[in-house]
Image (tube, grey):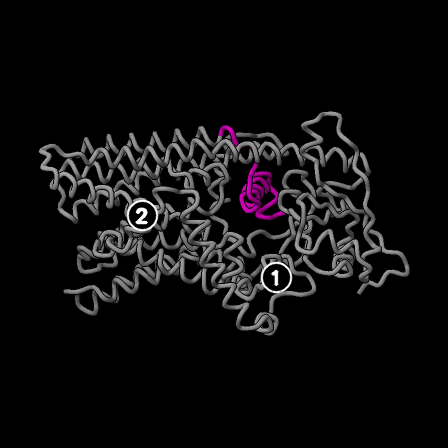
Amino acid sequence: MTRREIWLTTLVIFLIALGVRAAACAATGFPRPEDSAYYVGAARNLVEGRGLVTDALWSYITPPLVFPRPAFEVWLPLPSLLAAIPLALMTAARPIPLETALRAAQVTSCLLGALLAVLAWRLGLDVAQERRLADGRARMLALGAGLTTAVYLPLVLHATAPDSTTVFGVLAVGACLLANRILRNPRGASARDPRLWGLGLLLGAAALTRNEAVWMALVWAWLALRLPDASRAVRVRLVAVVAVVSLAVFAPWAVRDWLVFGNPLPGQALANALSVTGFDIFAWQDPPTLSRYLAVGPARLAEMRVEGLGHNLLNVLLALGLPLSALGLAALPWQTRDRAIRPLLLLGVITFSVTSLFFPVATTWGTFLHAAAPVHVLLIIAAVCALDGGLARLTRRLGWTKQVAWIGVVAAVGASAVFSAALLPATAQQAASTTRTYAVLGQDLRALGAPLGLGSDSAPLITDFPIWAAEALRTRALGLPDESPASVADLAKRFGAHWLVLVGPDHGRWPQVLDTSVPGAACFTLTPLPTPADPADAAAMDGVRLYKIGCPASAATP
């Protein structure tokens, strides 16, 4: 391909991917799921001058347990730092509305999502060149990879709900592309080689995005130390230079975590490996421990892993990408011979295996989901390669004289585009419904005299969706533990909370546990909410329950 053709193709893929994501974002005005709201809220607080903090306290394992809470005791800050840039440029108003903060974060996720499509195109071209395909087939294969990534539903969705997924995908795929170029020609592994510095920067930035960056670092070390036709000194320098640069990038954040949380690493991420239910992330008096974990027995421990594997395979990788995802997964074993995608393949296998087997419960709440963007790109390329190979065999069998590789591109892009067009409106509708729910809930709580706000005189709410409550109502919020009423009453006493809000239909044993005579149940009194005059408002509040927290003298509380 000529330089002009490369740049033109890059621009076309980037603009198409950007347009698709912009259209999806325009219809989505609320950050769903909650982790997206966390990143958006942290960016908003930073731009408002409050610092890198959050007003949602949902993880009680890591001190300090204070309001406002220092952010990112579990997750990592780069997505919020990137979102803060357009937010600071877009508005000077204070306080910043949640939708404004979301739109700014969507700018970042749209641009990065478009870049991911370009990276997928480049990776597809590398595979085609490695296979020594004819120019026409190579162009079509690469174009199919890029355009399919541009419209692929699992990747488009993360533009509407900015979080760590797209950022990590760009950094990981970019690192794999650069790693391939270094391994093909290490140039003596000079410490002044800008490619090694670039790879170190990518890995360091990935480490500021997701903990799974450690697997990318291990993949690089494995491939570099096994590089054939290179001296031992060259192999060691390949690893050492990249390690030094990446550690230098991550070190300031590690120092910050050490000073704030007493640990340079996100230690609670390891505690998630001991979860026996997803609600353990909200544990107050019954946190995950090794003895508690082992007490569930071998059968349940095995069942957890089956559930984790099934969730990651079916829900994360296959369900939203059909039919292309199924084709890519089936064709994946035949892609192992391609050195161009070997780093990406190793990263995907390790990430999938570790999250499924070592974090089987946590992964059903999103651990692998938000690290899966590189794997989605891998499946897309595998599927496009399978279509290309199938059409090539059909052409030879039927004796056709013209290449029909374009049919594979149309099939891949068309199937993904139709699937996205069919399902994206549901996402927009859910966002609109959640927006309305919290708008009406805020009005009702203020009418009842609930002390909402961020001041020292404000009492936090306890709720099943603490991050949404904190960001939509602009108030302090506590995550509801799936524990006894006496334990939740103790949480309320510790933080001075007076109200419990349940937005979802259930939250583990809640609210059914309040219909029993267990200790502490008498501390929660169901409080009727006003019936909205607008039928749409009434529908949005259907099922929302409000409880006044106040323990009588006879209530048994810790």
Q: Nearer the viewer, residue 302 or 60?
A: 302
Q: Amino acid at mark 1?
A: Thr
Picture coordinates of residue 59 (x, y %)?
62, 57
Please give the name of the residue rendered at 72% of the width and 25% of the height, measured from the top-left corner. 534
Q: Which residue is outermost to the right? A: 553
Q: Is residue 388 left or right of residue 542?
A: left
In percent of width and height, residue 296 lies at 59, 70
Q: Quadrant of the N terminus?
A: top left
The picture quadrant where one finds residue 260 is bottom right
Q: How far is disc 1 from disc 2 in space, using C-alphas?
A: 40 Å
Residue at the front extreme? 398
User: Which contiguous range is marked in magenta?
Assistant: 26-54
Residue wearing tag 1: 62
> Within the image, what quadrant is residue 436 found in?
top right
| Label 1 close to label 2 by CB (< 8 Å) | no
- In this rendering, the answer to whether 521 lies above or below 457 is below
Secondary element under disc 2, as helix, strand or loop, is: helix
Mark closest to the chain's N terminus, 1 or 2: 1
Tell me: 11 left or right of 259.
left
Image quarter of residue 145: top left
Query: Is the residue 254 above or below the residue 173 in the image?
Result: below
Element under disc 1: loop
Residue 486: percent from left, percent from top: 78, 61
Residue 318 falls inside the magenta stretch: no
Q: Please give the name of the residue rendered at 19% of the width and 31% of the height, measured from the top-left corner.
A: 4
Question: Can you say which quadrant of the picture contains the C terminus?
Answer: bottom right
**Residue occupied by mark 2:** 328
* Picture mark count: 2
Q: Is residue 48 magenta?
A: yes
Relative vertical location of residue 392 with respect to residue 215 in this rendering, above or below: above
Crowding near the residue tagged with mark 2, few <14, some 14–19, many ≥20 C-alpha atoms within 10 Å: many
